[in-house]
Amino acid sequence: MHSTETEELVEVVLPGKVEPEGLRIRRGAVPAPGPGQVVIRMEATGVSFAEQQMRRGKYFDQPPFPFVPGYDLVGTVAATGEGVTPALTGTRVAAMVKIGGWASHVVVDAADAVPVPDGVDADRAETMVVNGITAWQMLHRTARVRAGQTVLVLGANGGVGSVLVQLARATGARVIGTASARHHQVLRDRGVTPVDHHTENIAARVRELAPGGVDAVFDHVGGPGIVDSWRLLAPGGTLVAYGTASTRDDEGSKQLPVLKLLARVWLWNALPNRRRARFYNIWAGRRNEARFRARLRADLTQVFEALRRGDITAQVAARLPLTEAAEALRLAESGTVAGKVVLHA
């Protein structure tokens, strides 16, 4: 086992429902890997919508406070445990962990570490882990979008949305995307028809652009607007709901908005119609561990290859030290940046 004894663990702790300034920095000994595990020396970890919800106590299945947030990370293998080939040491890998990524060193099962191809740096790879897997699986596994189809992406400039529109265009689909006006030129440059969700009636504008309806809608907003997303579908179309961003600042139960959405999806699918609704959860299927891991590895590998080929581009909004996580979180929540805010050790 490669040694990390001379290094120090630095991690960010979310102590409770706090403003970003309430995050704490904790230092200690670097953990040792157990059997089948590796220690990843973090090079880049991201600030996603999940962490924004977690600090409000609003993420659907977050653990009790206090805990170390951080949904995903990219880094190099610093130590290997029993049963893991020592040849992995020094390899750049990516991992999706849900919590624990905001740390200088992270222990993961070796089976969850996905190699990052040569030519893809840590920051760019980081923007594609949870966002890229989510976009790829929703597009290709859930909606099964094909060339020539028309799709609507809400929040087309967001972390998942920006990857989704690029993957959809690479597939040969026509893409309509909602975003603020300041992001429209970037969307046009990517071959996307933009709709301003602040000044335009989204449903009316999409009906103008696609009178027969769209083949897929990707909706992270949830709330009452999900009804419009359903009604915009063409016969045979698929609504993919994957969030409840509209309830971000609401008080009350963190489960209730998701349960309401799930109930609506169930009801729509129970009705006799030619459309379908799906609630996408990146962790679905985890009970079959081997299948889940194989699918995740295959899909993330496809995303990294698309990034390496130039089919998609990574947007790094800002890069800050791990110890400035509070500033990074506030920046990500400000809505003023395009792309993903990345933390580094």
Image: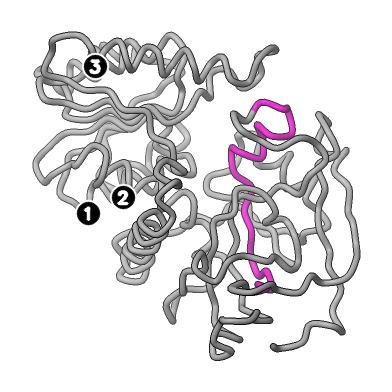
Marks 3 and 1: CB-CB under 8 Å?
no
Query: Mark 2: few, some, or many residues within 10 Å (few <14, many ≥20)?
Result: many
Q: Dot 1, how many residues are within 10 Å of its Cα: few (below 14), some (14-19), or many (20+)? A: some
In the image, taking residue 66 as reference, residue 291 lies left or right, namely left
Q: Quadrant of the C terminus?
A: bottom right
- How many badges with numbers are in the image? 3
Q: CA separation, marks 3 and 2?
A: 29 Å
> x and y percent of residue 187 in the render?
35, 42
Question: Is residue 22 left or right of 176 when viewed as pictured?
Answer: right
Q: Quadrant of the N terminus?
A: bottom right
The stretch drawn in magenta includes residue 282: no
Span colored in magenta: 39-58
**Which mark's residue is nearer the viewer, 3 or 2?**
3
Q: Is residue 178 visible?
A: no
Q: Tag 1 or tag 3, which sits nearer the N-term? A: 1
Contact check, label 1 and label 2, Cβ < 8 Å: yes
Gap in Å between the C-alphas at discs 1 and 2? Answer: 6 Å
Residue 309: tell me if it is visible.
yes
Residue bearing the label numbered 3: 269
Q: Of helix, strand and loop, which one carries label 3?
A: helix
Residue annotated with mark 2: 166
What amino acid type is highlighted by mark number 3? Asn
Q: Dot 3, how many residues are within 10 Å of its Cα: few (below 14), some (14-19), or many (20+)?
A: some
Q: Is residue 56 magenta?
A: yes
Classify mark 1: helix, strand or loop. Answer: helix
Any mark on residue 170, and which? 1
Residue nearest the viewer, comparing 136 with 169 = 136
